Image (cartoon, rainbow, N blue to C red):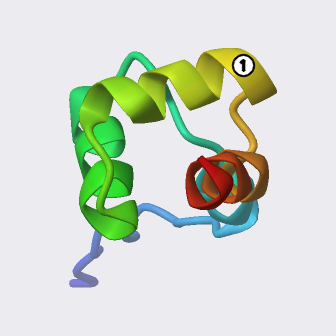
Amino acid sequence: MATTKKAAAKTSARGRKQDRARVAGGQDYEVGYEARKSGRSASAVKKAVKKVGNSRKKVERKLSRS
């Protein structure tokens, strides 16, 4: 009698790197993380995302210059 084990869901790292490279301006936890990381307010982070786009590098550069 053979026992079958359910295969674990295969997780892919394909989208993770791309996701980390972006700041979701509408997600409070991402805005809060970036605000704590940069020492700026959440509204400053949202304004930066609106101004330069959602690229994490661009947002961090904008926050460090302001």
The picture places residue 6, in percent across and down from the top left corner, at 31, 66
Residue at image position (75%, 58%) is 57
Instruction: In the displayed orientation, state which residue is furthest to the front.
Output: 66
The answer to whether residue 62 is above or below residue 21 is above
The residue beneath circle 1 is 51
Residue at image position (63%, 65%) is 12
Q: How many marks?
A: 1
Mark 1: few/some/many CA within 10 Å (<14, 14-19, 20+): few
Question: Toward the viewer: 22 or 40?
Answer: 40
Q: Quadrant of residue 3?
A: bottom left
Q: Quadrant of residue 16?
A: bottom right
Residue at image position (69%, 32%) is 54
Question: Toward the viewer: 14 or 49?
Answer: 49
Identify the amino acid type marked 1. Answer: Lys
Tell me the element at label 1: helix
Which quadrant is the N terminus positioned in? Answer: bottom left
The answer to whether residue 44 is above or below residue 60 is above
Left or right placement of residue 33 versus residue 9 in this view: left
Q: Is residue 15 visible?
A: no
The picture places residue 46, in percent across and down from the top left corner, at 45, 23
Residue at image position (59%, 30%) is 48
The picture places residue 61, in percent across and down from the top left corner, at 72, 58
Q: Is residue 58 visible?
A: yes
The picture places residue 53, in percent across and down from the top left corner, at 76, 26
